[in-house]
Image (cartoon, rainbow, N blue to C red):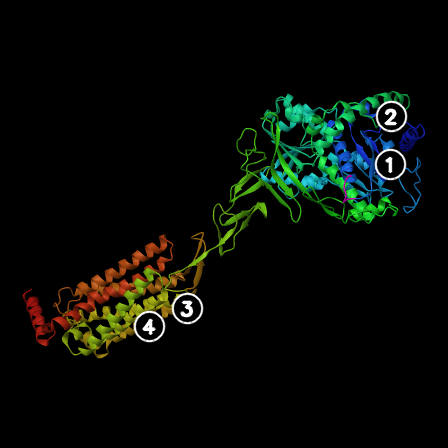
Amino acid sequence: MLLSSIYTYLLCFTNCFFFKVFCSTSEFRLEGDYLLGGLFALHEIDRVTPVFTPETTECVWHSTSKSAYKILQVMRYAVEEINNSTTLLPNVSLGYEIFDHCSDTRNFRSVLSFISNNGSIRPKEKLNNYQPKVIALTGPFGSSRTITVAPLITMDLIPMVNYGAASYALSNKLQYPSFVRTIPSNKDLIEMIIHIIQWFGWNWVAFLGSQDDYSTDGLKLFNKYINNTGICLAYQEGLSLNANYSLTLKKIDKLNINVIVIFALTQYASKIIKAAIANNIQDKVWIASPSWALNQQLPREPGIREIGTIIGIADRLLSLPRFNEFVYNKAKGTADAGHNDKAVSDVRNKNETCNQDCDYCSLMTAEEIINESPTHAFAVYSAIYTIAHALHKVLQCDMNECHKNITVKPYMLLEKIKLLNFSLNGRQVKYDENYDPTIRYAVVLWRTHVNPPQFEMVGTYEKLPEITFTIDNTRKLWHNNGSDPFSNCSVECKAGYSRQPEGFHSCCFTCKKCPRNSYVDFSRDPYTCFPCAESEWFDEGGTTCKTRSVVYPQFTEIPSIIVMISTACLIILLFAIFCLFAFNYDTPVVKSAGGSMCFLMLASLILSSVSVVFFFGNPTSVFCLLRNVIFTFFFTVCISCLTVRSFQIVCVFKMAAQFPKVYSLWVKHNGQWLFIAFSSFVHLISCVIWMTVNPVKLIADSWTFNDQIMLICEMGNTITLTIVLFISWFLGFLCLLFSYMGRDLPKNYNEAKPITFSLILYYLTWIAYFTVYLSIKSKYIVILNAVAQISSVNGILFSYFIPKSYIIIFQPHKNTPTYFQTSIQNYTQTISRS
């Protein structure tokens, strides 16, 4: 294989130089002080022809490429414009030699011509001594062609300023040290395609290309850069010219892929689009690479509108000033040159072609040339200007002249190209460390429903000073003016649902609802439900945990204020009654109410009311201990006083006569105080046990409400709490019993009704509280607890002390010994009759 390739090279070279073939000079050659090379694919090989012997390719045997002829004219126009310039390369003329380069393996004759010196090549010559035929060249079109010939050109560091090779491999300066390009590399193009796919939220795509370096490199980069983007490559294939395009498209359609990237040269893209039309493939989105994004023939294909929407990536369309005028002026001369070429062609056919022949070119009108695809026009234009600006710096030109005495070597231009930064038709031309240009590309939409078809710019992509990508969604982008096409393997999960993988591709999944208080962060990991911290909660439809609000009854809340004011009024009233009873201590009403025992009852009620203060504000463990234990203990002391008071009255009127000794001992040893002390002590011990064995403590309730943490005080050990409540409630039961026994006592001593009312209110209030406490969770349960305490105190206050206070203040005639003696006598007479 190696020997045959070497033989081919030598054969090509000797045919062109030793046989001295004469070629047309009107289109392909121009004399000048410095010669530039140009390689353009004026013909395209659209069929595979087996070759069994080494031979060169005669491009005129293959199909024509009119767009290539247009960019050839752009090169000629750029050279003429530079030669006519008085500021760029003054008093210096540029020449060119152009070849038709249609093959990537059998067109070496032109390359060998460029790197030769007077018909010979000396590969071992030092760069300082060797002067090739051209100082720089542009072309060829296509990555495979460029990669094949680039080593021959770059080994002498001849600047190869390319307009149509996008392979990212060419950015490797170790292998291709003098390769420069004026179009984005495949890396940039693939990144732009991914931006388009992500913009519309697609993730189920197909990638079709050819089997050349351009497509292979693009596919490799696409697979690399879609990692961690959520995009799945559902189908990929590199097609040959003889491939079954219909079968490929049917496979894609069967997989429900609605977005197809065609990253291929025009001849392959044309076959794919025509096959889609023939197979009635409909409603797809076709993303076109720059090589065919502005193709002029495909939009005119009958039925192309039905296949869907075609979005292309193209260079920003910049007009070339006076290019149309140049084409019109050259049209007649080109036609005349075409006749001369035909005469020369007869001579050439006897020997070999040097691929400087274009039979169809002379037949093209100026309008046809102008209307051809402008895809690479500016790329060629900027390539020639890049070489010219580099030469301008090497020759140390000023505004008037250049120093022609400087010997120009190709590598000198290469050094200057990297430093270039000039404006060309409103665009800044500069290169990075890999000799790749700044990126300014457009997203174009094919408007195939109008006649003639149009290319409308609907988006932009720029890489400097930072990556910016936008698409104007207000435009009617889709061929049926509908909503954005859907091309996803699975419908995206709703917030609160995690993905469950299904099949090979990560884009295919089912959705599973996350457990309570867990969430899915799609930017972090859409397959995992992350638990929220205890201080956080997850709102359905959200993507992150939110901080919970910590709730408790605050002093500033209206219910809290009402309870606090009520408590303050209650304490003031109790204190006032305390003072009233103290001032009227020797009166019958106070003595009948219990005498000194009344003060213990009132003090207990005051201290019970004070516990309400601990229910509001940010709770602490100390507050939790005090808020219930203070009330429970002192209110129980008050109930024990009522119990003793009821028992004493019954004893005086009913039991003293029947059990005189027992009554005597009770009075002698102050039985009422012993009972109060004993019951209070037992209750105090139970309260201490309640507070020490699994005591009441502060807890943060994070399970009742999603968005709140309630600071509440739990009740502590159930058994000890039951004992504490049992003592209090049992004393209340005894009190009720004794008061019932004395229901027929004198009116001034009959406490049955007020005690029964206060104790029933006490029981009902706490039964209601515990019912609500066990059934409803709210921060206002704490306030209800405080209200239950106040109600209990108010029950005793208003049923027992307020009536007696009323008599003392408003009915003083009833607060006399005579009045009480009368009541006792009436009671004695009633008993005697019965």
Residues under numbered marks 1 and 4 in contact, where contact means CB atoms less than 8 Å apart: no
Q: Residue at x 24, y 78 (%)?
A: 669
- The residue that mark 1 highlights is 114
Indicate which label's residue lies in the foreground, 1 or 4.
1
* Quarter of the image where the C terminus is located: bottom left
N-terminal of the pair, mark 1 or mark 4, is: 1
Residue 681, numbered label: 4
**Circle 2 — which element?**
loop
Residue 80 in magenta? Answer: no
Where residue 51 appears, as percent x and y from the top left, is: 85, 24
Q: Is residue 688 left or right of residue 26?
A: left
Region rendered in magenta: 84-88
**Sequence-first disc among 4 and 2:** 2
Q: In the image, residue 783 lies at what x, y percent?
A: 34, 60
- The amino acid pointed to by label 4 is Phe
Q: Identify residue for label 3.
A: 622
Q: Marks 2 and 3: in contact by CB < 8 Å?
A: no
Whether 86 is among the magenta residues is yes
* Marks 2 and 1, how far apart at CA: 16 Å
Give the percent coordinates (x, y) of residue 721: 37, 63
Q: Is residue 169 visible?
A: no
Q: Nearer the viewer, residue 462 or 653?
A: 462
The answer to which of marks 2 and 1 sits earlier in the sequence is: 1
Residue 828, compared with residue 546, is above or below; it is: below
- Which residue has dot 2 on it? 353
Q: Quadrant of the N terminus?
A: top right
